[in-house]
Amino acid sequence: QVQLVESGGGLVQAGGSLRLSCAAAGHPFSTYAMGWFRQAPGKEREFVAACSWSGSVTNYADVVKGRFTISRDNAKNTVFLQMNSLKPEDTAVYYCAVRSGNWPTSVQGEYAYWGQGTQVTVSS
């Protein structure tokens, strides 16, 4: 059974920081990219960041570049999203996802497994 469990969400003031974690288990991929996506109320889910198996190749949405950093610990099958300088428009449910390929694509349809999401709320 595939499990992706996100944690680290919460309520933070604008300008603050949060660190999200996502532990993956049970999927059949030996090497895989992992990504973060988010969905704000009334909006479609959008790409945030992704990284390759080694973590050496990363991909960020323009709106988070310079503020968010994705990293991973393959020994723990975990991906992280460090979010700094948070803005109210970052408020959303954040989802992690796993794909079989190594390229950290922003295309949602390329990701096979998804977590349940963790809420991030940024107050002004």
Image (cartoon, rainbow, N blue to C red):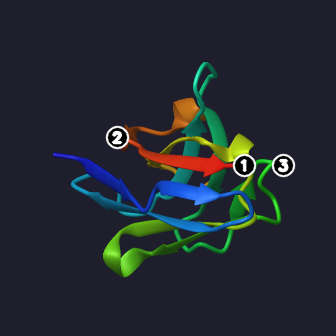
From the viewer's perspective, tell me whether residue 90 is left or right of residue 111: right
For the residue carrying disc 2, how many other residues have a C-alpha within 10 Å: few (<14), some (14-19), or many (20+)?
few
Which residue is disc 1 drawn over?
Answer: 124
Element type at marker 2? loop
Comes first in the chain, label 2 or label 3: 3
Give the foreground label among 3 and 1: 1
Residue 61 x %, y %: 76, 48
Q: Which residue sits at x=74%, y=64%?
A: 15
Write down the quadrant of residue 102 in the picture.
Answer: bottom right
Residue 43 x %, y %: 64, 22
Name the amino acid, label 2: Gln
Name the amino acid, label 3: Asp
Comes first in the chain, label 3 or label 1: 3
Which residue is disc 3 drawn over?
Answer: 62
- Residue 59 versus residue 61: which sits nearer the camera? 61
Q: Which residue sits at x=43%, y=62%?
A: 8
Comes first in the chain, label 1 or label 2: 2
Element type at marker 3? loop
Does the rendering let one see residue 104? no
From the viewer's perspective, tell me whether residue 24 is left or right of residue 91: left
Residue 116 x %, y %: 34, 40
Give the foreground label among 1 and 2: 1
Which residue is disc 2 drawn over?
Answer: 116
In this view, the residue farthest toward the top is 42
State if disc 3 and disc 2 touch (CB < 8 Å).
no
Give the CA distance from mark 3 to mark 1. Answer: 22 Å
Q: Which residue sits at x=66%, y=74%?
A: 56
Q: Which residue sits at x=47%, y=55%?
A: 10
Give the CA distance from mark 1 to mark 2. Answer: 26 Å
State if disc 1 and disc 3 touch (CB < 8 Å).
no
Q: How many numbered discs, if any?
A: 3
For the residue carrying disc 3, how many other residues have a C-alpha within 10 Å: few (<14), some (14-19), or many (20+)?
few
